[in-house]
């Protein structure tokens, strides 16, 4: 399709302006077809930037490696450029939107020389459904085009829904590597100087568009696939605030108990803290079943019946590769046997992928690392820090429809009614295995104080140290985090005022990541997490399986059976109140976390912190 065939005048004008600014050699409007997908991959493979994997082992699969500067989200280069600084809040980077646009326009000037500009119309959510939102991404990266094909719904059908004047979020993206005459890419093209990358959001611009996303210099993941974190979380969270719904960094799963009763659970865990794994979990508890609705993002609205309904706005999974094995996540391993894009994993001699903790040692004498170096194949699959074969944030991109445990209702535009929320993080100490909130407000309190060890999913911060990541939304909330807490409180209060308080999801906090004094995980995790899901399921039915404590409702002894290999003492340790640990936790929240929100912090939350402090000292 050609540019002049676009029927939507505003869209056409926007693309024409981008062409004038970025001066690509040609322009293509993407149709979302399989032929287009194949052609984009071929462009990269022919240029030597990707490798077709062995079709006997991984049919339809490809291996790509990025520049070492471009392996994860760049949080320090992510901006919420609201008109007023205070609307971005203390947890976001802010720059004046006019200044930022002026800077970025300077960078965008001529940035697509020698390349094709692709225009990708995409839908987050089933095409044409009331809850879906349309975006259009302009990019000069074929890699972005085929990943967007998998992660979103792309194509002409989206333009049909847009019609002549439908709403869309413009998403501008360039890898920032113009080509001179005759010049060819020899490595992953991007801006290698991290300080020149930008992932900018304009949530309330007054120009032609109210919401805009401008990304420059990175071709990787959430920096470049702009439907995901940029649109479906940062911009959508602003829309959700204004329109009374929720856009969250949450997996959605369908849980069926041995009696055949179903509940849907949505869970927020920070990046690389277990959402994909939980969404596809294979229960070790007999008779229980987990099916997947989504693994990263949930959009939720109240239905007329007072229940909160969730959809997964995405169409694929962009999952963390290392740690994925037949033991930890067989459903993911089965899903990625074909038609999958692998980025920054290792490449074996026989044309297959490999990563740390894949469950078997690398075959063959040598293996190619994500940096393209041939090294001796490791004899075990254990990770060795600093000698990674796969980058710790290496990922697979796979269509959700290829997942064997995808729930049949995963694309239902109505969504699924949520019975329980879980929040959690990666905490070596203090935080128990599971803890139920005493009320909606207490649940919001729990979400607001979430702490987690930093993982490799973000580029420029130190992995391993604990930071507060409220609701797992720290890098993804498009406005002031204090207002975000207030939004959650407001939705709960509204439901209660309308007599629907009992239909609100119950709220839980989980921690799979406690460690013993030798640094070993105390809880086996993965499939064994089904024991916690089962306990939560019964809690939703008000079963007598808990004890009230100052921090919340903890499992009654015996209500969760210890998995094989976990002693009763360990389980008791995991489910008790660590009074000293919590005292430290509270001091940290007061001094370093809540203090930054000033009078934007809802009083109810501060009050709960005071109550908790008093009870722990009593
Ligand atoms: P994003 O895609 O970055 O949002 O990550 P995610 O939250 O989906 O995390 P994912 O499920 O991909 O897990 C990240 C890492 O945590 C992987 O290496 C997993 O093997 C590991 N992991 C997941 N669940 C568990 C668990 O229950 N216990 C332990 N010890 N590790 C886990
Ligand atoms: C995350 O970091 O939470 C991800 C990966 O899901 S990315 O799409 O790169 O943001
Ligand atoms: Mn994520």
Image (cartoon, rainbow, N blue to C red):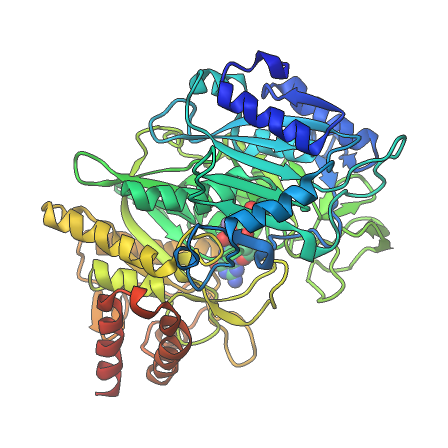
Is residue 594 rendered to the left or right of residue 546?
right
Is residue 67 rendered to the left or right of residue 525?
right
Residue 379, x across and y down, in percent: 77, 59
Which of 419/335 is in front?
Answer: 419
Which of 376/589 is in front?
Answer: 589
**Residue 385 at least partly seen:** yes
Residue 487, x across and y down, in percent: 28, 53
> As displayed, is residue 548 above or below residue 193?
below
- Quarter of the rendering occupied by the N terminus: top right
Residue 359, x across and y down, in percent: 64, 53
Q: Residue furthest bottom?
A: 618
Residue drawn at (86%, 35%), measured in percent from left and top? 180
Which of 1/23 is in front?
Answer: 23
Q: Residue furthest right?
A: 182
Residue 275, x across and y down, in percent: 47, 51
- Quarter of the rendering occupied by the C terminus: bottom left
Q: Splitting the image into 4 quarters, where does residue 602 fall?
A: bottom left
> As displayed, is residue 603 above or below residue 580?
above
């Amino acid at each position: 399709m050609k540019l002049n065939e676009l029927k939507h005048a505003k869209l056409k004008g926007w693309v024409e302006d981008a062409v004038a600014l970025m001066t690509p050699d040609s322009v293509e409007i993407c149709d979302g077809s399989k032929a287009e997908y194949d052609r984009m991959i071929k462009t990269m493979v022919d240029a030597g930037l990707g490798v077709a994997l062995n079709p006997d082992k991984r049919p339809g699969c490809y291996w790509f490696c990025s520049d070492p500067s471009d392996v994860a989200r760049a949080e320090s280069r992510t901006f919420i450029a609201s008109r007023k600084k205070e609307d971005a809040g203390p947890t976001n980077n802010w720059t004046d939107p006019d200044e930022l646009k002026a800077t970025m326009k300077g960078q965008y000037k001529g940035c697509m020389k020698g390349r094709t500009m692709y225009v990708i119309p995409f839908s987050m959510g089933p095409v044409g459904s009331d809850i879906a939102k349309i975006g259009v991404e302009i990019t000069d990266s074929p890699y972005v085009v085929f990943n967007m094909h998998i992660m979103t719904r792309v194509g002409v059908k989206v333009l049909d829904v847009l019609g002549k004047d439908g709403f869309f979020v413009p998403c501008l993206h360039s890898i920032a590597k113009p080509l001179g005459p005759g010049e060819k890419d020899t490595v992953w093209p991007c801006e290698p100087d991290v300080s020149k990358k930008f992932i900018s959001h304009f949530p309330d611009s007054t120009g032609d568009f109210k919401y805009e996303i401008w990304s420059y210099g990175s071709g990787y993941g959430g920096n470049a696939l702009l439907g995901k974190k940029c649109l479906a979380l940062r911009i959508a969270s602003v829309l959700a605030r204004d329109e009374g719904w929720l856009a969250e960094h949450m997996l959605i799963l369908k849980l069926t108990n041995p009696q055949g009763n179903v509940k849907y659970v949505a869970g927020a865990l920070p990046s690389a803290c277990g959402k994909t794994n939980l969404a596809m979990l294979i229960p070790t508890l007999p008779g229980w079943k987990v099916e997947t609705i989504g693994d990263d993002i949930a959009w939720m609205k109240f239905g007329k019946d007072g229940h909160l309904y969730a959809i997964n706005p995405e169409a694929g999974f962009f999952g963390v590769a290392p740690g994925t094995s037949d033991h930890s996540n067989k459903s993911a391993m089965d899903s990625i046997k074909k038609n999958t894009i692998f980025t920054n994993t290792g490449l074996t001699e026989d044309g297959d992928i490999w990563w740390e903790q894949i469950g078997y040692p690398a075959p063959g004498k040598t293996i190619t690392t994500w940096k393209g170096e041939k090294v001796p194949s490791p004899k075990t699959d254990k990770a060795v820090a600093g000698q990674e074969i796969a980058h710790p944030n290496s990922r697979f991109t796979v269509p959700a429809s290829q997942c064997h445990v995808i729930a049949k209702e995963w694309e239902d535009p109505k969504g699924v009614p949520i019975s329980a929320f879980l929040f959690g993080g990666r905490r070596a100490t203090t935080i128990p295995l599971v803890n139920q909130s005493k009320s909606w407000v207490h649940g919001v309190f729990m979400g607001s104080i979430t702490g987690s060890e930093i993982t490799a999913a973000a580029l420029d911060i130190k992995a391993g140290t604990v930071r507060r990541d409220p609701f797992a939304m720290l890098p993804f909330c498009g406005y002031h985090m204090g207002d975000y807490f207030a939004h959650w409180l407001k939705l709960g209060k509204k439901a209660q005022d309308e007599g629907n308080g009992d239909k609100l999801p119950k709220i839980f906090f989980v921690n799979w990541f406690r460690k013993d004094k030798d640094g070993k995980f105390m809880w086996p995790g993965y499939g064994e997490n089904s024991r916690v899901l089962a306990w939560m399921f019964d809690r939703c039915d008000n079963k007598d399986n808990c004890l009230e404590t100052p921090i919340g409702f903890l499992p009654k002894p015996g209500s969760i059976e210890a998995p094989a290999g976990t002693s009763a003492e360990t389980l008791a340790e995991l489910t008790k109140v660590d009074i000293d640990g919590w005292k430290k936790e509270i001091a940290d929240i007061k001094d370093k976390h809540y203090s930054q929100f000033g009078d934007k912090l809802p009083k109810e939350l501060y009050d709960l912190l005071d109550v908790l402090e008093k009870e722990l000292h009593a």
